[in-house]
């Protein structure tokens, strides 16, 4: 037997995790950090939150948070995008759950103007609770993205109910309704049902003129 015959075999290299599992783990990590960031910002204001706090409360190492997001400002950007995406998803669900377009629009508008009740972070930022305005810039700079996503969702949904109407009319109506609804979210009327009814009437006049 030669010397090479007795040489121990090299240890097998571990197989990398399948891409699906890696992405699932990454998404779980992001969700955990963002949920922790949301709770912390709501409780004490974003300006008081430290990256070390997020690591401790989420159970995700600080280095892992930095690898995934970057610095604290990048976490803030992701947090605002995450929160707005949740609201848009809830509005979309309200639209498609309704039996017709009028009741769907009413449900979607109600979901929008009441979003501060079910999203404490949103209410905290818009009321500048804790005398903290540190997340407002993210909402301002991210407003174009929020409007674009909501407008596309509403316009696509309206097209399914009004297939004969020209697309520009549907797009313009969606843009007007989204911007008006968001303005009532940020500066709410004391009578939400009146707000919903007004925006509903506006949409009906635009899409079903007599």
Image: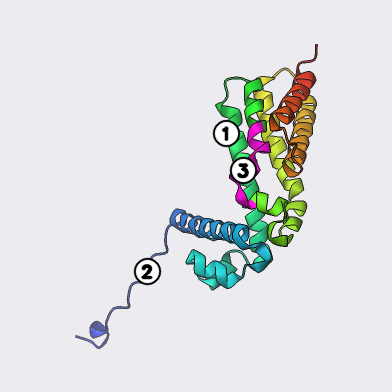
Alpha carbon of mark 3 to alpha carbon of mark 2: how far?
48 Å
Q: Tell which tag, 1 or 3, sits nearer the viewer.
A: 3
Residue positioned most to the front: 190
- Secondary element at tag 1: helix
Q: Position of residue 126 (x, y in %)?
A: 72, 51
Residue positioned most to the left: 1
Instruction: Identify the main secondary structure in magenta.
Output: helix
- Which of the labelled discs sits on residue 117, or is there none? 3
Tell me the crowding category of disc 2: few under 14, some 14 to 19, or many 20 or more residues within 10 angstroms, Cα based.
Answer: few
Which quadrant of the structure image shows residue 86? top right
Viewer can see residue 81: no
- Secondary element at tag 2: loop
Alpha carbon of mark 1 to alpha carbon of mark 3: how far?
17 Å
Nearest to the observer: residue 39 or residue 102: 39
Quadrant location of the C terminus in the rendered image:
top right
For marks 1 and 3 on the same chain, the one whose residue lies earlier in the sequence:
1
Q: Relative to residue 100, is residue 192 depicted above or below? A: below
Q: Tell which tag, 3 or 2, sits nearer the viewer.
A: 3
For marks 1 and 2 on the same chain, the one whose residue lies earlier in the sequence:
2
Q: Provide the residue span drawn in magenta.
A: 110-121
Residue in view at x 69 percent, y 57 percent: 129
Mark 1 touching mark 3, by CB under 8 A?
A: no
Q: Position of residue 122 (x, y in %)?
A: 66, 50
- Which of the labelled discs sits on residue 153, or is there none? none
Task: Give the residue at mark 1.
Answer: 93
Residue in view at x 37 percent, y 71 percent: 13
Q: Position of residue 178 (x, y in %)?
A: 74, 36
Task: Give the residue at mark 2.
Answer: 14
């Amino acid at each position: 037997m030669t010397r090479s015959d007795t040489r121990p075999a090299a240890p097998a290299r571990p197989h990398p995790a399948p891409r699906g599992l890696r992405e699932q783990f990454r998404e779980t990590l992001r969700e955990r950090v963002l949920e922790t960031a949301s709770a912390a910002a709501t409780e004490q204001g974003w300006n008081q939150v430290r990256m070390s706090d997020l690591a401790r409360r989420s159970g995700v190492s600080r280095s892992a948070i930095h690898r995934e997001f970057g610095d604290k400002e990048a976490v803030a950007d992701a947090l605002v995008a995450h929160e707005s995406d949740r609201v848009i998803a809830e509005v979309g669900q309200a639209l498609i759950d309704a039996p017709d377009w009028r009741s769907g629009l009413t449900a979607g508008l109600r979901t929008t103007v009441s979003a501060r009740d079910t999203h404490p972070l949103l209410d905290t930022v818009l009321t500048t609770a804790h005398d903290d305005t540190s997340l407002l810039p993210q909402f301002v700079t991210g407003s174009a993205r929020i409007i674009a996503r909501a407008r596309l969702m509403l316009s696509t949904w309206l097209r399914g109910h009004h297939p004969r109407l020209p697309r520009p009319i549907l797009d313009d109506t969606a843009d007007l309704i989204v911007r008006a609804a968001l303005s009532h979210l940020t500066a709410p009327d004391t009578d939400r049902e009146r707000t919903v009814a007004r925006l509903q009437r506006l949409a009906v006049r635009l899409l079903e003129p007599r």
